[in-house]
Image (spheres, rainbow, N blue to C red):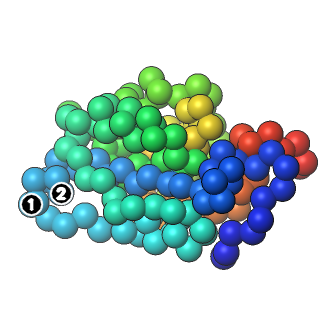
Amino acid sequence: MTAEAPGPGASAGWASGTRSATVLVVSTRAAAGVYADETGPIIRDWLTARGFAVGDPVVVPDASVADALAAALADAPDVLLTTGGTGLSPDDRTPEATATLLDREIPGLMEELRRRGLAMTPMALLTRGVAGVAGRTVVMNLPGSRGGVRDGLAVLDPVLEHLLGQLGGRRDH
């Protein structure tokens, strides 16, 4: 899918001609080099295929998620997708750190992510991720598994353009 020229009131990134996105991987073990992250590249490639300018995924330990989210949002990307830290382990705090930065939540995205995941595994019900808007940035927490990431991207795919358009002021439905 290639990016098309924006209409009036398109998302913030269209003002410069390029939409931007940030991928934040929250994993203490990946940040320490215990294993290579496999989810960040999936998200980056998905965003790139949709016309977003996106750098390499930023990998941070769970304890640094709040600072990493604030830093990512300071750059005002059009989209910020996280992966990891959404479960119930003692250091999983991605949803809490994200929720404090959102202006508005979009609960339907996470409801659908859990519903789709449940078709594959009952563990999908344990993801606590949130989705919403911070300023003009769409933010969504994806699980730390490849399957959870793919489910989340499948949920976001049919609505992302419309969502960005709404944030940019478009009123067509």
Identified at 38% across, 32% down, the residue is 70
Residue 149 at x, y percent in the picture: 44, 61
Residue at the spot of label 2: 30
Work out which quarter of the rendered image holds the N terminus and state it: bottom right
Going 66% across and 45% down the picture, which residue do you hit? Answer: 12
Q: In this rendered view, identify the residue nearer to me: 95 or 1.
A: 1
The crowding category of the residue bearing disc 2, from other C-alpha atoms within 10 Å (few below 14, some 14 to 19, many at least 20), is some
Residue in the foreground of this view, choosing between 156 and 118: 156
Q: Secondary structure at mark 1?
A: loop
Residue depicted at x 58% and y 48%: 78
Alpha carbon of mark 2 to alpha carbon of mark 1: how far?
6 Å
Q: Nearer the viewer, residue 76 or 113?
A: 76
In the figure, 117 relative to 66: above or below? below
Q: Position of residue 38 (x, y in %)?
A: 29, 68
Q: Is residue 57 visible?
A: yes
Q: Mark 1 Cα within 10 Å, few/some/many (few <14, many 20+)?
A: few
Question: Are the residues flagged by discs 2 and 1 in contact, CB closer than 8 Å?
Answer: yes
Q: Picture coordinates of residue 17 (x, y %)?
A: 66, 59
Does residue 107 show up? no
Name the image quarter holding residue 75: top left
Residue at x 36% of width, y 50% of height: 24
Q: Which residue is mark 1?
A: 34
Q: Amino acid at mark 1?
A: Val
The picture quadrant where one finds residue 55 is bottom left
Q: Is residue 135 above or below residue 114?
A: above
Amino acid type assigned to the residue bearing label 2 in the image = Ala
Tell me: residue 18, above or below residue 76. Answer: below
Q: Is residue 54 left or right of residue 172?
A: left
Position in image of residue 94 (x %, y %):
35, 37
